Amino acid sequence: MPKYIPWLQPSHLPDKIKNLNLSLTSIIRLVEYPVGYLTIIRPVNCVITFISVLCGAWVGKEIIFNNKIILAGVIGFLVCAFGNIVNDLKDIQIDRINNPRRPLVSGKVHKKVAVIMSIIFVVISLITASLLNLKPFLLVLFTILLLYLYAFYFKKTPSANFIVALISGLSFILGGFITDNILSLIPAIFAILIHTPREIIKDIMDIKGDREFGVASLVIIYGEQKARNIVCLFLVLLILACPLPFIFGFLNIKYLIIIGFIAVPLIIFTIAKLHDSHLVSNLLKFIMLIGLVAFIIG
């Protein structure tokens, strides 16, 4: 006969299962909290900003690595992280409707800790920027102020989409300042052309919460259909602009091949799928990455 084991008897099993569930819950919570503090900075966006700074330094030039270029990229990463945290801090109430899984709303991140993180990122960014030069320092300071004003004022106005697009373009300018690269203006302009429609699409996705909290976005003012038409217009302009850096001799054939065979077909596909906001948002982010590769190696 099998040996009698008290804790395996049916009367003991519910307690054991309950304790096991509690242990698993504790483990999940231990994992969720650090993940929440990583999620709040939107690390993918921060990495894209880091690469954008490097792209601004390298576009049309030889790819070189030095301390100043890498430091500028890190500054871009930290400033982007600051902007994302401030944005989440300001949007707690709206995110209860639009994005209930965001770290602050879901309780995975404490508000006071988020505030401290944002301050640390600003201080480190400004101190390191002061080591580069006056122009990079002033640009970083201006971007930080613009991010703050965006979160607390511009975000509820029709200009919000263009402010975000402008800030994204400044990442390339920062890299251009490091290597005295006037060609950094080219990807900066392209950044405005692709970020503006993506921000409008995100506003379409967030229309429910924005309307309830009095946000005067383009989508709410002009309606969803007109907003999609504006998105389409920007994407058509983007397609028309794509070959210009090659035509004017700023970038080489490698740029044209990547843009012509990958980016432009994806933009056309995106226009065809404008009714699917989630898909369009993801496609535009992927096209941004393709564009970065084209500018760097072109």
Image (spheres, rainbow, N blue to C red):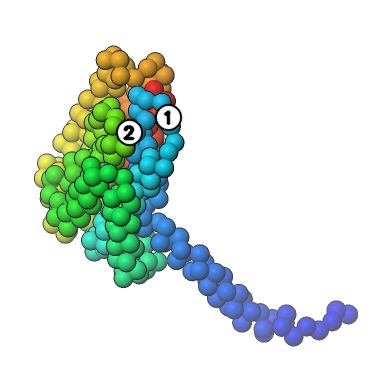
Where on the picture, by quarter, is residue 87? bottom left
Work out whether residue 205 or residue 298 is closer to the camera in this orientation and state it: 298
In the image, which disc is placed on residue 137? none
Judge whether 3 appears above or below 247 on screen.
below
As helix, strand or loop, the secondary structure at mark 2 comes to helix
- Residue 145 appears anywhere in the view: yes
In the image, which disc is placed on residue 179? 2
Q: Nearer the viewer, mark 1 or mark 2?
A: 2
The x and y percentages for residue 247 are 28, 14
In the image, which disc is placed on residue 63? 1
Work out whether residue 164 or residue 136 is closer to the camera in this orientation and state it: 136
Determine whether, in the image, residue 2 is placed left or right of residue 58. Answer: right
As helix, strand or loop, the secondary structure at mark 1 comes to loop
Identify the residue at image location x=30%, y=55%.
127
Work out whether residue 115 or residue 261 is closer to the camera in this orientation and state it: 115
Disc 1 to disc 2: CB gap under 8 Å: no
The x and y percentages for residue 8 are 73, 80
